Each structure stands twice: as C-alpha cells, then as structure tokens.
Amino acid sequence: MSKSVLYCRVSSLDQKTDRQRVKEHEFDKVIEDKCSGKIPIFERPEGLKLKLMIDRSLISSISVWQIDRCGRDLRDIINFIHYTTEKKIPVKFISQGLITLDENGNENSIAKMVISILGVVAEMTRIQILENQRQGIELAKLDPNKYLGRKPGSVEDPIKFLSKKRNRQALDLLKNGYKNIEVAKIVGLHPNTITKIKRHL
C-alpha cells in the first residue's frame, strides 16, 4: 500500500523539527534527516530510505515544509523534483503552497517555475552565508587578539577537541554505527577530522 510521507530536515542533531511537523498525524510516515542541506537529499541517511521507498512504489505523495529542506543547491533540488515527477509522485511544499503535479498526474508548470526561482534564492542564501563567514575570518585575522588560532606544533587538548559542537555530533553518530564517510557528509567535517575523532573514541 502506498503511503503519504512527510519529509523533515534540520542541519544539526540538537535542532528540532517541530515547526516542520505540521499536522503530522495526517501522514502515514514521517522521515527526518539531521544533516547539512548541501548534501543531496538521496545521499542523506533517511533520504536514501526515501528513495528506496519511491523505487519500490511504496509512496503516493511527499510533503516538505519548504524547498530548502530538499537542498541548498539548485541542481540537487531540480534533480529531486525531476526524479519524483518521473515516478508520478507529487511533492508538496507546505509553507509555499506549491505542488509539483496536478490531480491528473501532470506536471504543474507554474509550480515548476516558482520552485526554480526559490531554489536559486536558497542557493544564493547559502553562498552569502559562506561569504560572510569568510569575510568575518579575514577581518578577525587583522586583529591578532581576536584570531589567535592554535600555535604551530602545539597539541590540542582531547577533551576540548571532542567538546566542539560538530565534533560532539560526529562522536554521537560514530557511536550509533555510522561510517566515517557518512558522518563527514552529515556534520560537514573533513574525513581526516572524523578519523581523529574515531581515534579518540
């Protein structure tokens, strides 16, 4: 029997999806990912399960709170929409009031246009955030009192290292059996950092 699915995503383990779970009792299943939006939806731990359900014809419709929950990269969003459209599965974006297919299973051209525009906005927002971070670091480097960093050759305290937010998240995922490469994608850390965390574990 095909199911209506509500898909939710937040960026980190300590964030909650309450706002996205609008009328969740109306859906047959709720799928939730806690990972970076720059990871394509079908490469996420729960997103992969979503794809398997689609391929096995177990899903009748997918609802998502808003477009950027599917991705921060326009290409990834378009690929997701294209895939679900090919499978004749309507995707509804709740807060934006958009649905990819009409009641006859035909592609909604107006929704497709708006989704493309909003996808560009999501991508530009991500680029702007990264640019602001880069500029902030460059400005901080001009003041040695604000951007000290770690002295070359010094050894970082293991407890301090593991106490960092993303490192803690990675540690939790490793304890739950996730592979290094999966953890790196989910929390957005370099694989070498994950190896170092695992070594401490």
Image (cartoon, helix red, strand yellow):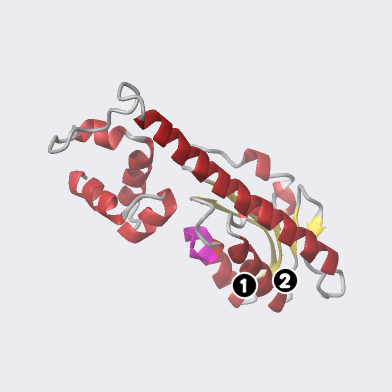
The reply to whether the C-beta atoms of the residues labelled 1 and 2 are less than 8 Å apart is yes
Please say whether residue 7 is one of the residues in the magenta stretch.
no
**Dot placed on the residue nearer the N-terminal end, 1 or 2:** 1
The magenta region covers 42-48
**What's the distance in space between the residues labelled 1 and 2, CA to CA?**
8 Å
Front position in the image: 14 or 30: 14
Q: Main secondary structure of the magenta part?
A: helix
**Are there few (<14), some (14-19), or many (20+) residues within 10 Å of tag 1?**
many
Does residue 132 appear to the left or right of 176 in the view shown?
A: right
Mark identifier at residue 54: 1
- Residue 76 spot, x, y in % from top left: 58, 64
- Residue 112 spot, x, y in % from top left: 77, 65
Among the 4 quarters of the image, the one containing residue 151: top left
Mark identifier at residue 89: 2
- The quarter of the image holding the N terminus is bottom right
Q: Is residue 126 above or below residue 153?
A: below
- Residue 165 spot, x, y in % from top left: 38, 36
Query: Which residue is depicted at the point 24% across and 53% down?
Result: 195
Secondary element under disc 2, as helix, strand or loop, is loop
Front position in the image: 11 or 8: 11
- The quarter of the image holding the C terminus is top left
User: Is residue 1 shown to the viewer in this render?
Assistant: no
Does residue 103 appear to the left or right of 139 in the view shown?
A: right
Does residue 111 appear to the left or right of 52 in the view shown?
A: right
Among the 4 quarters of the image, the one containing residue 3: bottom right
Q: Which three-letter amino acid code belongs to the residue tagged 1?
A: Ile
